[in-house]
Amino acid sequence: MTDDILREVREACGLKNAIMGSVELERATSAVTVRLITDLTYTEDDYNIAYAAVRRFVPQEFSLELNITKLTPDCAMVRRKILSLISERHPALASIVGEKDVHVERDEEGFIFSVAILGDRARGEATVRSIEDELKKSYCGNFRGFVAKVPLSADDIVIEREAEEEKFEAPARTFLVENFTPIESAEAPVRALYISDFNFVSEKAVICGAVTAISERSYVKATGEEKQYLNFTVADATGSLTFTCFPRKKTVDKIRQIKEGDSIVVNCRSEARGGNLRYTSTAINYGSAPEGFVPERRLSRPVPNGYHTVKPQPFVDYTQTDFFTDTSLPECFKNTSFVVFDLETTGLTAVPVAGEIDGIIEIGAYKVIDGEIKEKFSTFVNPERTAALDPEITKLTGITEEMVRSAPSYKDVLPDFVKFCDGSVLVGHNAINFDYKFIKFYCAELGFLIDYKVVDTLVLSQKLLRLANNKLNTVANHFGITFNHHRAEDDALATAKIFIELIKIKKSLP
């Protein structure tokens, strides 16, 4: 409907570039206020044309107030908006595009801008087109953008060879199966997979563990016949797994005799359904791991040699204290490195429930070196989920489906985050019970078996402060720190400042 209104409004000469500023409805007084924005000088006739056009779309029982504002952006304003859009919508690009790479000029038709982007030109053109669209939503007038050629002389060219990463595939670990007693097959399997390693699709695999839960259910076939099936949950020393069993008639009674605590060995297959693995048994027998079995540690994927998708940026906060001259700064801050981080996620499920865990959609992190905030790591993240982003998450964080879908995959972001955190202690607010669980789970999925020391500012504030509660915004208010809550980058910066203040009170590291 907005397009229809603007189509009629723009018939007025002075409003031919008009955009919709806002529409407000006051139900108590049955009043509608519409705000239009134009970059041209408009006349009383133009106003009357616009009023009549808008009036046709407002029910007669409502009064109408039409406000028209003349707003003419200048080149500096447009340039700041472009840089802001790149930072918000294209975080990977923001790490390499600075103020010197954006140029804006004005001509009779509107604004012409260029963005200097090295690399994939087609992707650069798509980025410029999206910036054009956003500018037209924010300002009146015409905006034409293009990817600037980057003039380089031979002396200017510095070849930075990206460090080659060795291909890494951790072999699935196995252990010997002992005490085999047949139920459904006479052939004894020799070795079984560690349950924590069985995270791939397979037609033929073997697991072995103690039964921790059993449930029997039924379903009705297309013929109307009712069939029974059982769900077993088994656990070994590394993890647990739930599989479905459709028992054969000749062994169903023996299968039903299995009870919780029994150790069984299971031949099963796995298949991907809805983004998760589903397991089905092909044979169940009794069997166990060797007595006194201790799992071997899985090999971890090494820390990357360099950054590939998201590169950290230098950070300067001109409002922060100069910690090098602050005599109240504890000595414990010297020669230390902390990464203070925060996540935004698709939901609150931080541990796998029925094989499902929520996804990461934003990472914000700051590196505190010798007590000073010096580096920033920030990006939206594509969790690669088929389901759309929950509207409640968008309402809470302001992160939209478009931002997530156009962001780099978590599979590309997390290796860079591991690189950023290497050699540092992690810090977060409620990180131990929430944020760190996501990082550890998804890093393990990619082969990084991380085991960072984590300092939780929630716990620290509970010990050091006497507040009504210790929520992040409450603790921030206590220290006079203002920030945009529920955005990872802002929450992480606020947490970094809180952490520094708490250590100054404690005068020692946790």
Image: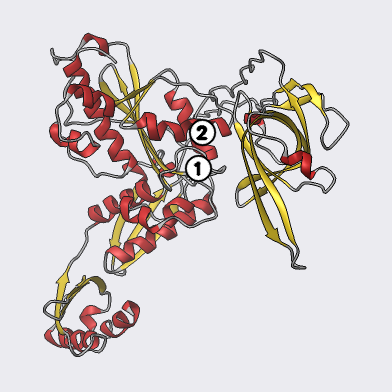
Residue beneath the point at 70% across and 50% down: 229
> Which quadrant: the N terminus?
bottom left
Most extreme residue toward the top is 331
Residue beneath the point at 78% across and 45% down: 252
Against 344, residue 424 (above or below) is above
Against 188, residue 334 (above or below) is above
Tag 1–tag 2 contact (CB < 8 Å): yes
On screen, residue 266 versus residue 85, left or right, reads right
Q: Position of residue 234 (x, y in %)?
A: 64, 33
Mark 2 sits on what residue?
441
Against 127, residue 355 (above or below) is above
Give the amino acid at mark 1.
Ile
Give the amino acid at mark 2.
Phe
Q: For the residues marked 1 and 2, what is the alpha-carbon distance in whole angstroms?
A: 9 Å
On screen, residue 386 versus residue 334, left or right, reads right
Mark 1 sits on what residue?
357
Q: Position of residue 270 (x, y in %)?
A: 71, 43
Q: Position of residue 370 (x, y in %)?
A: 28, 16
